[in-house]
């Protein structure tokens, strides 16, 4: 019966992987800042890492997947399957008006298996969003004319779509205290940017509609390392095991291929719909997007099966970003996160609250956005729980985040978000050959 249940889980996950591409066509952001670059970059880690301030580099798990440092796969002892989803409610505040938005998306689906039963090798694969585009922006401007001297018009800009990533990774313990790993990430997806120029009908001029549809795909690679060890303090019944981890991951710069369809149409006078004429149409434009180099480093220390504190720093050279050779309003990003988790007594079978893992964290980032000469920075506080399922290492993971991004200075938008992250992790011994039936 148990094997049948495992088979149904595997079948469901395979179906889920096949349908994820369609699911990521939904919008995962409604931020006006997603007009810049390839959109809002999405954190790809699991719920546990998210709720600890998005720390990842100093964490190794026997019972969970840390795909943001592939060296951690060498610590796996049993098969792990994880899935999660995010609900986000935001409030946008500008100098003149405010707006409320909400979005929801599937956050990740990951699968990891140890090779052998000694915890020295592991493989993992999965899928998650990489970036999201979803904006609606109105601007007003004018251009000179004989009579009247200026014609005033509005531009309406709309963006939809985003990129996803499918990864495959391998981790190996090359020494008792050193593990290495690599992820191969296939980035793919579509973004559509539409700009309508709307001229008042009294000027008897045609409106225009411009569509740019980009199909983006290509490979990036993560190279990870972790130096780790355990130590025992005390003797006999008072002995306690502690673990420390130093970790880092480097993602070298790479080029993603882009195929673009560009269509410019004229619209009837005073209309935002209907087509009068196709001015220009080219569906064979090719180019590249330069995905910049990024790095992460961190440290973790804690008592095994009891508590851990961890901290990360990270950076990305977004100033080197180019799309069809053109730069954007991007700067190098830099950030840090700190977090911790605590389980009162994971062996207490009678008291569920003592077996719950309690998590909390904080993060700050000088983001990659710079608009009107003003940087857009981010800070957030997080908290969450890992609730054990029955008598197993599987967990229901709940997380909460309050995040603030941007400022109202210099005509910018300040965004405040409250997010709920729900995940589930299955941990069990699968794919082992039994010695006796």
Image (spheres, rainbow, N blue to C red):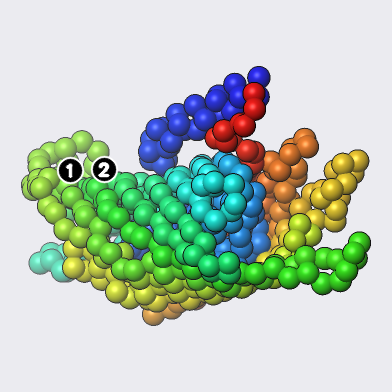
Residue at 18 percent across and 68 percent down: it is: 325
Asked if residue 59 lies left or right of residue 34, the reply is right
Q: Please provide percent x and percent y for residue 202.
A: 20, 50
Give the quarter of the figure containing the C terminus.
Answer: top right
Q: Which mark is residue 123?
A: none
143 vs 417: above or below:
below
Quadrant hosting residue 120:
bottom right
Q: How many marks?
A: 2
Q: Earlier in the sequence, mark 1 or mark 2?
A: 1
| Of the pair 418 and 147, the residue shown nearer to us | 418
Q: Please provide percent x and percent y for residue 416.
A: 59, 61
- The residue at the far front in this view is 436
Q: Please provide percent x and percent y for residue 320.
A: 29, 74
Give the quarter of the figure containing the N terminus.
Answer: top right
- The residue labelled by disc 2 is 272
Residue at 33 percent across and 51 percent down: it is: 187
329 vs 105: above or below:
below
Asked if residue 344 lies left or right of residue 436, the reply is right
Residue at 55 percent across and 24 percent down: it is: 8
Q: Which mark is residue 267?
A: 1
**Do the residues bearing badges 1 and 2 touch, measured as CB atoms within 8 Å?**
yes
Circle 1 packing at 10 Å, graded few (<14), some (14-19), many (20+), is many
Residue at 10 percent across and 42 percent down: it is: 278
- Tag 2 secondary structure: loop
Q: How far apart are the two marked residues, 1 and 2, measured between alpha carbons?
A: 7 Å
Q: Please provide percent x and percent y for residue 374.
A: 43, 78
Residue 97 appears anywhere in the view: no
Circle 2 packing at 10 Å, graded few (<14), some (14-19), many (20+), is some
Residue 294 appears anywhere in the view: yes
- Tag 1 secondary structure: strand
């Amino acid at each position: 019966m148990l094997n049948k249940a495992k088979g149904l889980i595997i079948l469901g996950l395979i179906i889920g992987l096949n349908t994820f591409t369609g699911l990521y066509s939904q919008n995962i952001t409604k931020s006006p800042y997603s007009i810049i670059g390839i959109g809002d970059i999405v954190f790809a880690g699991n719920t546990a890492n998210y709720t600890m301030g998005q720390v990842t580099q100093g964490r190794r798990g026997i019972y969970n997947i840390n795909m943001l440092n592939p060296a951690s796969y060498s610590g796996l002892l049993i098969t792990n399957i994880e899935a999660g989803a995010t609900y986000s409610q935001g409030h946008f505040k500008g100098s003149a008006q405010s707006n409320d938005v909400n979005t929801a998306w599937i956050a990740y689906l990951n699968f990891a298996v140890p090779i052998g039963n000694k915890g020295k090798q592991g493989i993992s694969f999965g899928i998650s969003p990489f970036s999201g585009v979803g904006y609606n922006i109105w601007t007003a401007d004018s251009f000179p004319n004989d009579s009247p001297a200026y014609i005033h018009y509005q531009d309406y800009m709309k963006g939809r779509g985003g990129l996803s990533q499918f990864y495959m990774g391998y981790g190996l313990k090359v020494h008792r205290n050193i593990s290495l790993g690599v992820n191969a990430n296939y980035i793919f997806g579509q973004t559509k940017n539409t700009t309508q120029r709307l001229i008042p009908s009294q000027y008897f001029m045609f409106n225009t509609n411009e569509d740019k549809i980009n199909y983006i795909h290509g490979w990036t690679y993560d190279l990870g390392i972790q130096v780790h060890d355990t130590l025992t303090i005390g003797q006999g019944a008072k002995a306690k095991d502690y673990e420390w981890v130093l970790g880092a991951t480097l993602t070298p710069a790479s080029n993603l291929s882009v195929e673009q369809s560009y269509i410019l149409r004229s619209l009837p006078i005073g209309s935002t719909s209907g087509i009068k004429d196709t001015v220009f149409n080219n569906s064979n434009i090719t180019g590249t997007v330069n995905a910049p180099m990024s790095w992460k480093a961190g440290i973790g220390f804690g008592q095994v099966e009891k508590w851990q504190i961890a901290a990360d720093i990270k950076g990305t050279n977004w100033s080197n970003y180019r799309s069809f050779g053109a730069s954007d309003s991007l700067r190098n990003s830099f950030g840090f996160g700190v977090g911790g988790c605590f389980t009162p007594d994971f062996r207490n079978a009678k008291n569920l609250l003592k077996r719950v893992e309690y998590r909390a964290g904080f993060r700050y980032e000088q983001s990659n956005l710079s608009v009107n000469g003003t940087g857009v920075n981010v800070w957030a506080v997080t908290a969450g729980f890992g609730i054990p399922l029955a008598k197993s290492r599987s967990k229901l993971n709940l997380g909460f985040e309050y995040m603030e991004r941007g400022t109202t200075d210099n005509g910018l938008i300040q965004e405040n978000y409250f997010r709920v992250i729900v995940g589930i992790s299955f941990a069990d011994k699968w794919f082992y050959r039994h010695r006796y039936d």
